[in-house]
Amino acid sequence: MAKLGILTGGGDCPGLNPVIRAVVRKGFLEGYSTVGIKNGWKGLIENDVEELDLKKVSGILPKGGTILGTSRTNPYKKEGDVAKAKDAYKKLGLSALIAVGGEDTLGVANKLVKEGLNIVGVPKTIDNDLSATDYTFGFDTAVNIATECIDRLHTTAESHHRIIVAEVMGRHAGWIATFAGIAGGADIILIPEIPIDIEEVCELIKKRHARGKTFSIVVVAEGAQFKQGSMVVQEEKLDAFGHVRLGGIGEALGQLIEQKTGFETRVSVLGHIQRGGSPTANDRVLGTRFGVKAVELVKDKKFGRMVSLRGNKIVDVALDEAVKELKTVDMDLYDIAKVFFG
């Protein structure tokens, strides 16, 4: 039998296991055996793999995370790792590799395609910031979780007459903040695409309270920045793809709001809660569709491509196009959110 490899890289994400399950099932029907590469590109470098059969993927559809494990390993960061990855690919006798990940994982995949490896990409990120696809799986789950949390914050904010700042994920794009903020009835939504004007934020809150409201909910994406300042980070240390560890914008924002308005303010950081647990039905279906399409691309020898959702159709696009730039929030959508600010 011809052999497929599959790996999941970068942050974990609800919907990864449905992709793995779909690849194995569709691969079996098309005459492929499948080998799972553990912990992203790290597993390919170290030739750390396991055979995946129908029994191995039975029952994983509703499970969050990834049964293969993940890492933020970048083969292009350490000399010799690319050669090790290419050697492992050959030793495993792979007909093709399916790489499931976000901009970093697929960026590596795109480079390896140019070095002669047969790779198909599957887009994955809760941030929904990958170009060339309307939505990525994991996003819907994250938005639903964040929305539920905002709903719960409403009741305690109203009871205690407080401002509550909810910090959600979103490094360079505020898709989760915008969607969850609209769905959760947030009074202000702050995203990385638009620098934060703290005076304007406080003025909106004051106007709302002047109308008789005794509480407000402010949703902020972790990558949002003040007009004068840079990203708020937990530490300056960079990961293998050059990213700092974000976190703290909610606390900084909360302190300023309380100082400038005089209203008692609390901060809730949702963090990894957003990417954990069982995927929504939508993400299970989307992950499944992506996995099936990825095997079809392999069968048709359409390498260097990524599966993509366009409208309600699953199509394929060039990896070059997919990783060319990040997809930021549609300002028409943000203008709708602004109708309800303050």
Image (spheres, rainbow, N blue to C red):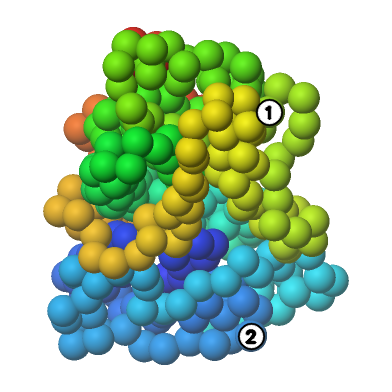
Q: Residue furthest right?
A: 79
* Label 2 Cα neighbours within 10 Å, binned few <14 / some 14-19 / many ≥20: some
What residue is shown with label 1?
226
- In this rendering, is residue 241 above or below 153? below
Q: Is residue 226 left or right of residue 217?
A: right
Dot 2: element: loop
Q: Which one is nearer the viewer's eye here, 250 or 298?
A: 250
x and y, in percent, of residue 295 in the image: 31, 59
Q: Position of residue 214 (x, y in %)?
A: 33, 27
Task: Choose between 208 and 227: the one closer to the eye.
Answer: 208
Inspect this view and state whether residue 191 appears: no
At a point 30% along the width and 16% down the height, the residue shown is: 212
Q: Position of residue 271 (x, y in %)?
A: 47, 57
Q: Nearer the viewer, mark 2 or mark 1?
A: 1
User: Does 257 sit above or below residue 62?
Assistant: above
Q: Secondary structure at mark 1?
A: loop
Location of mark 2 (residue): 46
Amino acid type, residue under disc 2 in the picture: Glu
In primary-sequence order, the first of circles 2 and 1 is: 2
Tell me, yes or no, whether the two marked residues, 2 and 1, touch with CB atoms within 8 Å. Answer: no
